[in-house]
Image (spheres, helix red, strand yellow):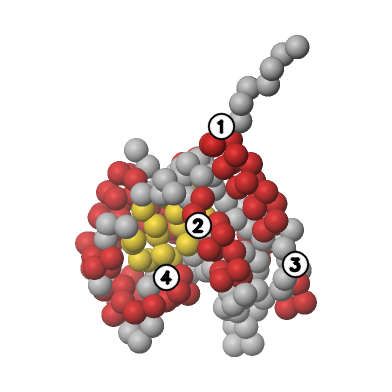
């Protein structure tokens, strides 16, 4: 009789991680508040080296189930200096938004904020599995203010201007929506100083 190989701690970790992902993707906690219904979008494997904590999916990502599969994703990939193949390699890049589901449209235009229940419920369970992460990108005000609460009393412009203060573990970025193009023009230091450093540390993290 063939004796089965012993289960390794790594295999147990991956099994537990897969169960957690399945639980997240089956989540219906906010279903009554979501106009398009729940479709949690999260990516990554425990061996990922880059973690992107962003805002929440838009309508395009809700349709495809693929994080940043829209024009904001094109802009973010350009900022990072990554092509789609590397960006969507879950063994290298993990994505854990503040809200896993599309939250709907705000009355004044634009999307609503991420649902407030999501990150407190799931991030403390999910984040420990990404123990190999060398760099965390906090993308947009919701991620920045959640993970760096000392920034909540500052304007986003003032916070982003202090991006060097949070290296080497965290890198702050504005949300890469169409508004970011206007913001970049008002803040030329972003392209001149921040982006070259961002691409350098992202490349180092993914080696």
Vertically, is 152 above or below 162? below
Q: Residues within 10 Å of mark 1 (few under 14, many from 20)?
A: few
| SS state under label 1 | loop
Of marks 3 and 2, the one in the foreground: 2
The mark that comes first in sequence, 2 or 4, is 2
Q: Residues within 10 Å of mark 4 (few under 14, many from 20)?
A: few
Say if mark 2 contacts mark 4, CB within 8 Å.
Answer: no
Q: Residue at x 50, y 57 (%)?
A: 127
Q: Residue at x 63, y 41 (%)?
A: 15
Q: CA distance from mark 2 to mark 4?
A: 12 Å
Q: Position of residue 89 (x, y in %)?
A: 51, 41
- Circle on res. 147: 4
Q: CA distance from mark 3 to mark 2?
A: 20 Å
Q: CA distance from mark 4 to mark 1?
A: 33 Å
- For disc 2, the marked residue is 127
- For disc 1, the marked residue is 8
Q: CA distance from mark 4 to mark 3?
A: 25 Å
Q: Position of residue 93 (x, y in %)?
A: 47, 47
Q: Residues within 10 Å of mark 2 (few under 14, many from 20)?
A: few
The mark that comes first in sequence, 3 or 2, is 3
Of marks 4 and 1, the one in the foreground: 1
Q: CA distance from mark 1 to mark 2?
A: 21 Å
Of marks 1 and 2, the one in the foreground: 1
- For disc 3, the marked residue is 28
Say if mark 3 contacts mark 1, CB within 8 Å.
Answer: no
Q: Residue at x 65, y 52 (%)?
A: 21
């Amino acid at each position: 009789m063939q004796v089965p190989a012993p289960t390794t701690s790594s295999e147990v970790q991956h099994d537990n991680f897969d169960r957690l992902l399945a639980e997240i993707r089956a989540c219906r906690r906010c279903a009554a508040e979501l106009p398009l219904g729940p479709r949690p979008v999260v990516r990554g494997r425990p061996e990922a080296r880059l973690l992107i904590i962003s805002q929440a999916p838009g309508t395009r990502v809700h349709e495809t189930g693929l994080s940043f599969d829209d024009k904001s994703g094109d802009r973010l990939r350009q900022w990072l200096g990554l092509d789609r193949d590397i960006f969507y390699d879950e063994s290298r890049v993990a994505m854990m938004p503040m809200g896993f589901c599309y939250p709907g449209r705000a009355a004044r235009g634009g999307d609503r904020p991420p649902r407030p229940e999501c990150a407190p419920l799931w991030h403390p369970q999910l984040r420990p599995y990404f123990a190999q992460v060398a760099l965390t990108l906090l993308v947009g005000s919701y991620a920045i203010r959640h993970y760096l609460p000392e920034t909540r009393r500052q304007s986003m412009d003032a916070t982003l201007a202090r991006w060097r203060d949070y290296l080497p573990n965290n890198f702050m970025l504005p949300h890469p929506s169409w508004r970011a193009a206007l913001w970049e023009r008002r803040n030329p230091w972003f392209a001149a100083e921040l982006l070259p450093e961002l691409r350098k540390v992202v490349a180092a993290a993914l080696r």
